[in-house]
Amino acid sequence: MKLDNDPVYRECLASGLVSAPIKSTNKQLKPYAKRSVAIFLVGVILVVLYASAINPTLGLIDNVVVSRDAAIMSLMLLVGGFITLLCKADINKIAEYSVFKSGMVACICVLGVTWLGDTFVSGHSSEIKELARS
């Protein structure tokens, strides 16, 4: 059933509980939007290739200098820098974007919980081992 034909929706619309949908408009992409997506995809591909190359199963790189986690963080930080420089991002507005805010909240939450867990386990590793043995 189409939304316009739904009696419950019509009643809510008439009583003002919901507002009528606004017609979507085609937004114009910013000039460097496609370039930024391409740079991001190249970064993701590089991360996947490096993680595959250091995988012991493939054995392409035996002497791993940079761990997978450090490589992911470093490469994606580099990608972010390239996007900022090559796509002429307005640096003053970055902190206002919802994607940045969400990412920083997620980063703080994940790193905070990880740090807390590591601190707790490191501080009580002998007690945890003793408890696990019994």
Image (tube, rainbow, N blue to C red):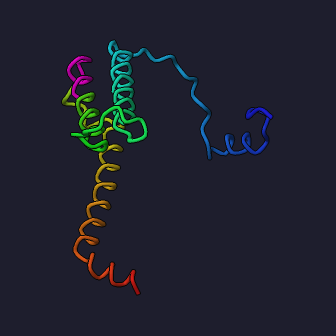
Q: Nearer the viewer, residue 13 or 83?
A: 83
Please state if 132 lies on the left or on the right of 117 as rendered: right
Q: Residue at x 27, y 40 (%)?
A: 73
Q: Nearer the viewer, residue 128 or 16?
A: 128
Please state if 26 lies on the left or on the right of 69 as rendered: right
Magenta segment includes 106? no
Q: Which residues are magenta?
A: 81-89
| Furthest residue toward top | 31
Magenta segment includes 87? yes
Q: Residue at x 40, y 16 (%)?
A: 29
Q: Please provide percent x and percent y for residue 85.
A: 20, 20
| Furthest residue toward bottom | 134
Q: Please provide percent x and percent y for residue 58.
A: 41, 35
Residue 24 against residue 51 in the figure, above or below: above
Q: Residue at x 30, y 66 (%)?
A: 117
Q: Nearer the viewer, residue 67 or 119?
A: 67
Residue 118 against residue 47 in the figure, above or below: below
Main SS, magenta region, reads: helix
Using the rendered view, name the quadrant where residue 84 is placed: top left
